[in-house]
Amino acid sequence: MADMVTLKINGQTVTVPRGTYILKAAQMAGIDVPNFCYQQELRPWGSCRICTVEILGRRGGLIESCATPVREGMEVATHSPACMDARQEILRLYLIDHALDCAICDASGECFLQDYTYEHGVDANPYRRPKRKSPTLHFSDLIDYNWDRCIMCARCTRVCDEVIGATALSFTSRGLESEIAPAFGDSLYTTPCTHCGMCIQVCPVGALTDRWYGNHPWRVAKTQTTCSLCAVGCTLEVWREDQDLVKVQGPWETGVNQGWTCVKGRWGHDFVKDETRLTRPLLRRGGRLEPAPWTEALDIVAERLATKQGEGFAGLISAKATNEEVYVFQQFVRAVMGSNTVESPARRTHAATLRAMATAFGSAAATNPQRELLDTGCILLIGSNMAEAQPVMSYNIVRAVKGRDACLIVINPTKPTILGDLATIWLAPRPGTDALLLSAMAKVILDDGLADEAFIDARTEGFAAWKLSVSDLSLEGASAATGVPAGDIAAAARLYARGGLTASARPERGWPAATLAFGTGLTQQPNGEANVQAACNLALLTGNVGRRLGGVTPLHLDANEQGAVDMGALSDRLPGGAAVTDAAARTALADRWLPRWGEPAAGATRIESLPAAPGRALSDLWSAIGAGEVTALYVVGDDPALLDPGAAAALAQLDLLIVQDTFLSETARLAHVVLPGTTAVEKDGSFTSNDRIIQRVRAVLAPVGQSRADDEIIRSIARRLGYQMPHRASSEVMDEIAQVAPDYRGVNQDRLEQGGLPWPVADTQFPGTPMLHVERFATASGRAAFTTVDVTTLLAPAGAFPLALALGDSLFQPPGGAVGRASTNLSRLEGGARVEVNPADALGLGLAEGDPVDVVTEHGRLRAWAMLTTGVTPGRLFIDAQWSGASSALLTAPPGEPARKVTAARLEPAPGAALDSARL
Amino acid sequence: MATQELDIVEQQHLGGGRRRLTMNMGPQHPSTHGVLRVILELEGETVVGMDVVPGYLHRGVEKIGENRRYHQFMPYTDRNDYVAAPSNNLGWALAVEKLIGVTAPERAQWFRMILAELTRIASHLVWLGTHAMDIGAISMSLYTFRDREMILDVFEQWCGARLTTNAMELCGFQRDIPDGLLDNVRAFLKVFPARQQEYADLLSANPIWLGRTRGVGFLDPEVAISLGVTGPCLRGAGVNYDLRKQQPYLLYDQVDFDVPLGDADESDCFERYLVRMEEMRQSLRIIDQCLERIPRTGPMMADEPKYAMPPHGAMKYTAEAMQRHFVLTIKGFNPPVGEIYQAVESPKGELGHYIVSLGDAVPHRLRIRAPSFVNLACLPVMSLGGMVADTVALIGTIDIVLGEVDR
């Protein structure tokens, strides 16, 4: 092949793609070349010189292999005497000033310098001077730096720049005085640092260290598992010493993250050992929750549940539960309690997607793998602060933009972290006007003739009706309503349609693909469904579905939102995706589940058939409780009192509230019975990631105290009610799921041990489906549907509430709140609830950075710290929802409407001292 | 206690008023030198059958060795023949050095010989004291342990430990010989010959001693060879087999010493006593020559950065040595692929280490040929037809250590 090059390395013939660097070629041939500054997936740097190899027959044959591309016929020797001599000399130079710290250095045992010194037999050093001891510098509460161990390889600074996009670390000073330092000072808090800690993971020596680690690799056991703190689905390697979790890091070249991690994954897991964990069941006695033995708690739960069978019972399970647990739970709700009301947070974040995207494509799941973001030419990101909510996914975008000049279009009322600064265009529409903005973009594409007509003809339906509906849309009108300049709307539309190309001529093979991702900022609005419809229309119009590097990706928050949907934790869907109204599907499940009924417990009745009517959606649940239609609720791991407006009041009216959680959440405080469950690092099972990859979750630690696996608790209750649900390992549950859910048919735990599988997995040989809708859509007709969008804009802030408040996600807070509060590390980074204000608005109110301020809406008020930033345009506010409970404090949701992330508000300066601005 | 330790397990009536008793001895019997269990079949006081049941001190040492890096295993060898720990250390060190193709520097080799021969004397002193005590000469152990203390003091001066010494290291020694240590060895050489003569005077012509050892426990040389018996037991039967002569290691081929042999026709406990007494004198000769010939200065550790620990001082003060030390400690070295067997003449006999290496930091297979275990095979042979009381003398004369038998 023309683009392959053949060369010889150590006499071995190697054929690699042209442009491959010698070091990489050697690695592909199984030859290890020492390296300090070489880091996979980064641009070559060539500063450490330790990868020096000899090119035979070349004058001055020694050259650094990490930055030298291969040439045809080249003969390379990686371990010739000349190389070894050169490397020994380089190592001696490194060792002149290197600290005598091996005994107390975190890196000892996994230190590149230590290994190479040994491997190269560096014994005596002719160069010698007194060691220059330097103090350990605390860059932040988590990251330490020791100059006297640093070898100036620049891995940390390059990772921070090229992958994370923060550029918080850099070299300062020159020559022998060189050192690594945070930008503009000695603290990472004044930099854009995301505290991801990748600088520590890539450090080949022990220069950058985790301040709280203080352990050694030979003392720990390492287990690979899937992160439970967001929907990306990173593979993590969890290190434990006995039952202490000592470190979390990303194993290189594994899983969707390929080794990269974020602050939550690396440092958030210390919540597992927090002293506020629930370790014993609690029973409400005389108005107070008091510890009780398991048997008593379970007996009481069963006794009370026996009278609550039927539609008056509701279940709500966290999307941090594994697929297996969700399956067992919904089986419990449907087959034991005889109710279809079993919901999960996917409904809270993506109710609009579940309706709109499923209508358009036949499936509400992400269409393309997230790693494709690395290669795609144009990324349209809507209503998401991805660098905070799904940080590791955002690294792909950072690398695409910084490494390949990919085009990034951001549509968000506030400027997203990191990605906002990298964006080619940032559109900041007024909250509530997204559907109009996206439809206006579609109109521009239509008018410019950039639509992919061949795709529209062959793969879609409803185009003509939709085209008619946008015909009277004017760019100027949209600009006026959304507050986005008309030129920006048009430019963004053209970039998306042209796949990032700025040329006006259409390439012969059509415009390159562009991908679209939207977050909860788009869906959690009163008109969220219209927003998602408009986004889907945009992708269909440009032919970007079922296409490599294209696609539509809804961005989930919780780790297993996709899995919870797949497992049937929806009041209108059975596991496997069939509607509950589908009699055949219901019968098949009834035949599987209902024969397990034994003798019903006193007061309970045998369920003879699965309920046929859909249950209540999460958004309807609180009004149903208020109306007395639902009297018992079983919540597993979720916290509606914190996250759902109006939920707290409804929960107080329940006859029976059972909460199974790892912490005493806001909801658990209201419960009649609290059962201690386990966290994801204490149980086996699987998660389904944002891009549909089913991945293994492994138990690393034993459950704390008396806490038990969540599915075991559910089974214990079922058995007390007279339903046969013996203990089963997660692998056996997965086997049953494979029989029930067509998309999971070929999945079993043995296969998952080898790596994740993207569903649909048709059979046990099938490798999985990274991309959906390639030949036909999952709709009944096989065609995608254009939907006419209601572009009415909502929410016009005025009068007493002149500001538009948007709620979003925080980098330091996993979804939920309790987990983030319980993590000591994350609490160190999070100063408290922050409200982001434009300096112009702040000036009018006399606010300074760090001042305490009350955010007031029609429904409530919340104390927060003012953070002045131009990331929000005048007239807007932004607040982190997870930490503060802002959604329940400030919002209200009319019955039947999805949870929102926007409302009208005003600010009132509050008394009290200002917060140190460095901690904001 | 005695009734528990010598339990009648079974009785058989043979007619004519004769009975055959099956009796259990040990594993807690004091004369079994640890936890050896012996099942005796007796007619009257005559031993007509014997079953040796080892294994009460089994720790799985070989399996442990297959999970320990080469440097790491050294302290475990102490616990095999624990009255002669430095000899075990030496066996392991030489085996690994053969595997990796390294020879310790000359000064280290002379010093290793000094330690090994001191060990031989210390081990024989323990044997002499306990063996004599078993057959009635209680005071002998008080004398021999007094002299052994001098040797243990030397060990302590060298490595801080007296019993489980961990005295040797792979490829040489990390430290130099402490000041005054060799003088203490010389002091021992000065006082010990006269004392040993005293013990010989007390025992060699003692009628009770002769009565309990002369003609007791005949071991045919052919049988001994076929059983694989080595060490003083074999040489007591007149077979000239001493690895220091037959397969010289260290610098034994450069020193003069004789291998004492017993009379093949006698080949009894007394012959073995004579052999061991003479071996102590020969060890003194060897140590004397070592002290003469050991270089005053010179390296103690081979210059092999890949395998050898860095010297103790450099390890603390230079980054190169410290890092090498840590890699060797944390990860160990990777020896060549292959298998080797290396034996040394320990006080008890041929102590061999067999290593199969797949190039990993730990051996793929480790086998220890422990002389006590093999020599124990001659106990039933020597006991048959003898008295129960002779069995006690025979266990003593073989000189077993159960740490090594059971491993």
Image (spheres, grey):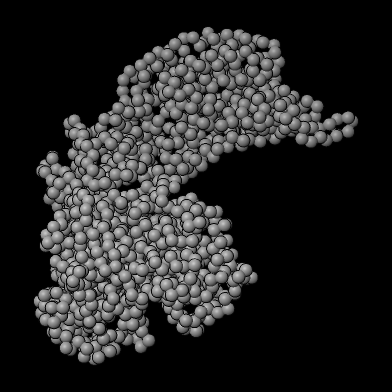
Q: In this view, does A651 lie above or below A784?
A: above
Residue A856 appears left or right of B363? left
Q: Is residue A32 above or below residue B94?
A: below
Nearest the viewer among B318 and A622 is A622
Residue for point 37% across, 38% down: B329
Q: In this view, does A438 lie above or below A100?
A: below
Nearest the viewer among A628 and A203 is A628
Nearest the viewer among A695 and A533 is A533
Residue A528 appears left or right of A72? right
Residue for point 49% across, 30% down: B78
Nearest the viewer among B306 and A14 is B306
x and y percentages locating residue A350 in the rendered image = 33, 73
x and y percentages locating residue A669 in the rendered image = 42, 58
x and y percentages locating residue A123 in the rendered image = 26, 35
x and y percentages locating residue B313 in the rendered image = 30, 27
Residue for point 33% across, 42% down: A214
| Residue B116 at least partly seen | yes
Which quadrant of the figure contains the N terminus of chain A? bottom left
Q: Is residue A393 above or below residue A215?
A: below
Number of dots carrying numbers? 0
Residue B219 appears left or right of A497? right
Q: In which quarter of the image is residue B115?
A: top left
Residue for point 41% across, 47% down: A244
| Residue A511 at least partly seen | no
